Each structure stands twice: as C-alpha cells, then as structure tokens.
Image (tube, grey):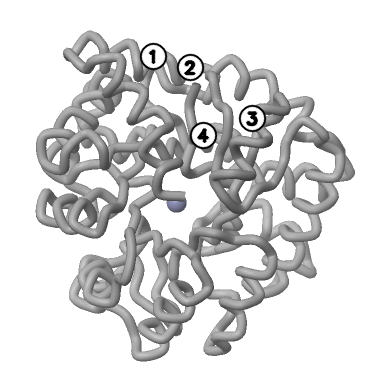
Amino acid sequence: MVFDGHSDVLYDVTRLRLMGETHVLERLHRDRLCRGGVEGLVLALWTSAAQGQTFWETVPEADSDAARTRIMMDAAAAELAECPWLRVVHSRAEAEAARAAGQLYAFLGVEGMAAIGEDLTGIDRYADWGARLGMLTWNEENALAAGAGGDPEKGLTDLGREAVRRMQARGMVVDVSHLSDGGFWDVLELAEGPVIASHSNCRALCPVPRNLTDDQLRAIRDTGGVVGLNVYHGFVHTDPAGQTARTLALHAVHMAEVMGVEHVACGFDFCEFFGPGNEGAEGLEDCSRIGNLFYWLEQLGMTLAERRMIARENFLRLL
Ligand SMILES: [Zn+2]
C-alpha cells in the first residue's frame, strides 16, 4: 500500500464540477487509485493561474487567487460529501482509523499561498480548513517568498518568515517543494520541526530548479523531514529517453544514499488529467501504475522493508 504525499486531483474535481459534473473522484479516480495501491494521499489546494492553458481562464469569476481558492474549497467540500469511501483526516490516528474502516484517507495541503496576499490570518484560515501541510509559493514570487520559477537568490520576505512561524505554531508542516533555493535555506533556518519537499527529485540526476541538490537533501534529513518522489517526466530526466519508471527508482536510490532511506517518500504529482505536456514518466502514466516504481526499486536491490518505508511509513511517521 502507498501513501501519495502530493495529489492534484482537486484540480480535476474543480474543473469538472464547474462544467456540471459530480462524483468525479468516484467515476474517474477511485478505481485507478485502488489499482495503484493508494491507501491515502495529500490533496493539494493548487489555485495558481500562472501556468498557461488552465481552465481557470474560462471561469469569469475566478479572477484572483483568492477567488480561485474559494471556488476550489467549495468544489472540494461538495465532492468529498459524495465520497463515503474517502475520509479527510488530520492526524496519523485518524488516518489509521480510516484505513481500519476500509476507507481511503486524505490530508489537506496548500500549494502556494498567493491567495492570502499580505494577510497572515490567511494561514489560520488554511489551518482551520484542515490543511496540515503548506507551501508558501507555487513557482511564482508572491508577498511571502520567491518560487522555483524565479530568481534563485531571492528567498523569503519578512512576511514570509512570519508565515513560516505561524504555520509551525498551527502545526502545519512547511513544504519547500516549489521554493527558490534562497527560500529553501531561509525556511531551513526557521525550522522548528521536520521540513518536507513533498514532490521533488534529485538535481544530481535531473538538474532542474524544482529538484533538490544533495546539500538540500541532507538539510531536509537533518530536520527529520522527507522528500517525495515525483513522476512528472521533466523532473525525472532532461532527456526524454531517460524519463522512465526505472530512472525515478534511481532517484530513490540516490536519495537513500545521500539521506538514508528513512527520508525517502512518495509525492507523485500525477497530473495526466491536466492534458498534453503533463505526462508522468514512462511506466508511471497514472496512479494505477505505481507498482512499476516498486518493481524497479526491487530490481535495484531495495529490500521489502526499505520499499515499505518509501511507500508509506516514512511520510506517515512524519504526519
Ligand atoms: Zn507542484
């Protein structure tokens, strides 16, 4: 069984519900989650319109990050009310209870906080909504921090430092996956507990800003945090020929060598439902194919105990 520490299915849910559909998770996602062995996941509130070709452009009232956040929260609430087989949880104990009851479970996370502007009470609203993890930015630069899409020298603003303190005070795990390098090290300086990168791979194998250097991996290890393996083809290898499940397994092996296997986790970031250009690596086209990653981990010499740690135990220990 697998815990996926980063899922964007709420994007698909919101898009389709705004087109009048219901039971999106039930009809389009449940079966393949089950086939992939997913027992639980983090549902991300991702409302950035910074990426072109998003459906938000077709929704007139979705004219700000704050508006999109309200729309996605409403869609999520309506959808989850239709899912007796999926329980939103806030702790390991609640997750285990859901699992024992035969339900999938979902933690809530925030992917980018541009919506709160300069108002840090927005952190409390995320926490009150139930978010247990949060990223200050998506890839953009906002009032809190610079993202991985911008200047790597720029880090957190003074407000961003306050935001990190407030998140920690509210028991939210700080997730550095979309931060600039400068922001990464600023967060590490403020960390009072485990810091995670929920969906980032290794820059040593695929040198892109969304992946982490070995020094960054070790810094996360030193907080007790985890790094989640990401299937997105462009974060697996820069050469299309190398964008395979086997290469992602090599990222896991590298992480285990650098950090220790107890800090390697899953944050698959499947987003094939976003349309062309968002494919997972070959063999990891959607979440039903997660087993291919674990096949390659076994082929590369990982023991069953190590694979279980990566599959679920490491992330759940932290949560
Ligand atoms: Zn992301």
Q: Estimate the spatial distance between the alpha carbons at disc 4 and disc 2, rounded to whole Å.
A: 18 Å
Q: Secondary structure at mark 1?
A: helix
| Mark 3 closeness class: few <14, some 14–19, many ≥20 residues within 10 Å | some
Q: Estimate the spatial distance between the alpha carbons at disc 2 and disc 3, rounded to whole Å.
A: 21 Å
**In front: label 3 or label 1:** 3
Can residue 92 be seen by looking at this rendering?
yes
Image quarter of residue 247: top left
Residue 80 located left or right of residue 206 = right
Residue 226 located left or right of residue 5 = left
| Mark 4 closeness class: few <14, some 14–19, many ≥20 residues within 10 Å | few
| Mark 1 closeness class: few <14, some 14–19, many ≥20 residues within 10 Å | some
Q: Position of residue 309 (x, y in %)?
A: 34, 29
List the residue tagged with mark 4: 276
The mark nearer the N terminus, 3 or 1, is 3
Circle number at residue 99 = 3
Q: Secondary structure at mark 3?
A: helix
Q: Mark 2–mark 3 contact, CB under 8 Å? A: no
Residue nearest the observer in this picture, 45 or 222: 222
The mark nearer the N terminus, 2 or 3, is 3
The mark nearer the N terminus, 1 or 4, is 4
List the residue tagged with mark 1: 292
Q: Position of residue 297 (x, y in %)?
A: 26, 17
Q: Estimate the spatial distance between the alpha carbons at disc 2 and disc 1, rounded to whole Å.
A: 6 Å
Can residue 149 be seen by looking at this rendering?
no
Q: Mark 2–mark 1 contact, CB under 8 Å? A: yes
Dot 1 amino acid type: Asn
| Whether the residue under disc 4 has CB within 8 Å of ligand 1 | no
